[in-house]
Image (cartoon, rainbow, N blue to C red):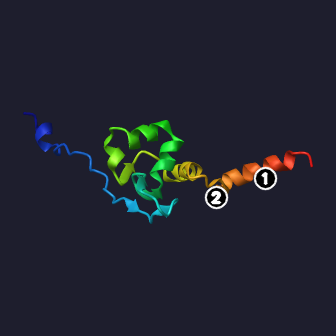
């Protein structure tokens, strides 16, 4: 063994990043009589209380997931960790026919209506 091997410091593993606890935000209620809570996001977890039927009607994927033989079909809470909470909020508003609550949609409608002849 050479002296350089003896004198060199031991190999160290890189330090792991600190594990942070996910932030759980208050539930956003899209349907007060909701029968399903979707928990969206990973670092920031945003729960949404929704109508299972409205969500199923909005998407064939959700229809299969919530009405078929998938584990989520009987669940009262479904985690969607890979989805963005803000984007999902807009999608869920559309699924629950709350278009009037979507700011971006309001802006688009006002721009379109301003171009229409009177």
Relative horizontal placement of residue 27, taking residue 86 as reference (left or right): left
Q: Secondary structure at mark 2?
A: helix
The residue at 42%/45% (across/down) is 82
**To which residue does mark 2 refer?**
101
| The residue positioned farthest toward the bottom in the image shown | 26
The residue at 19%/42% (across/down) is 11
Q: Position of residue 27 (x, y in %)?
A: 45, 63
**To which residue does mark 1 refer?**
110
Relative horizontal placement of residue 30, taking residue 68 as reference (left or right): right
Relative horizontal placement of residue 3, taking residue 46 as reference (left or right): left
Q: Is residue 43 above or below residue 69?
A: below
Q: Position of residue 80 (x, y in %)?
A: 40, 48
Quadrant location, the N terminus: top left
User: Which of the 4 quarters of the picture holds residue 25?
Assistant: bottom left
- The numbered mark at residue 37 is none
The residue at 22%/45% (across/down) is 13
Q: Residues under labels 2 and 1: Cα distance?
A: 14 Å
Mark 2 in CB contact with mark 1 (< 8 angstroms): no
């Amino acid at each position: 063994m050479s002296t350089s091997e003896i004198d060199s410091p031991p190999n160290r593993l890189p330090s792991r990043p600190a594990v942070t606890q996910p932030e759980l935000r208050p539930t956003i209620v899209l349907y007060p009589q909701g029968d399903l809570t979707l928990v969206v996001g990973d670092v920031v977890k945003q729960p949404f209380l929704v109508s299972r039927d409205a969500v199923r009607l909005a998407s064939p994927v959700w229809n299969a997931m919530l009405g078929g033989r998938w584990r989520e079909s009987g669940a009262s809470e479904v985690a969607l960790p890979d989805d963005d909470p803000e984007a999902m909020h807009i999608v869920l508003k559309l699924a629950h026919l709350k278009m009037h609550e979507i700011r971006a949609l309001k802006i688009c409608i006002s721009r379109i209506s301003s171009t229409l002849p009177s």
